[in-house]
Image: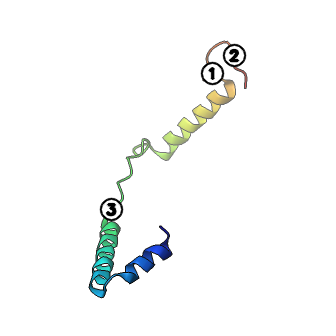
Amino acid sequence: MSIAEILAFIRSLPRRERLRVVERIVHEAAEADTVEPPAAPPAIWRDATDEEFGDFLAAVQSARSSEALRAGDGSRGR
């Protein structure tokens, strides 16, 4: 059903039924707005200092450039 069809259907209802439908929609929308989003998971590096995290990133970059993280005989090429 399109929005126009739904609106036409609601308009065809008796006044009391229209008010009941609108009231229910408003209450359901209000309830949906009060639901809190789930909390974000804790960060892995939350307790590390900026220097420790920087050292980690530098080590990863060094390993990437030296291909120390790659295993096998190299048959899978880049």
Residue at x 44%, y 78% (from the top left corner):
7
Q: What number of labels is visible?
A: 3
Badge 1 crowding class, 10 Å Cα cut-off, few under 14, some 14 to 19, many 20 or more, is few
| Callout 1: SS | loop
Q: Residues within 10 Å of mark 2 (few under 14, many from 20)?
A: few
Determine which residue is flagged by label 2.
Answer: 74
Q: Amino acid at mark 1?
A: Arg
Foreground of the two, 52 or 26: 26
Q: How far separated are the C-alphas under marks 2 and 3?
A: 49 Å
* Residue 4 sits above or below residue 40 on the image: below
- Using residue 75 as the reference point, say whether residue 42 is left or right of it: left
Residue at x 29% of width, y 69% of height: 31
Of callouts 2 and 3, which one flags the residue occurring earlier in the amino acid sequence?
A: 3
| 31 with respect to 47 (left or right) | left
Residue that badge 3 annotates: 36
The type of residue carrying mark 2 is Gly
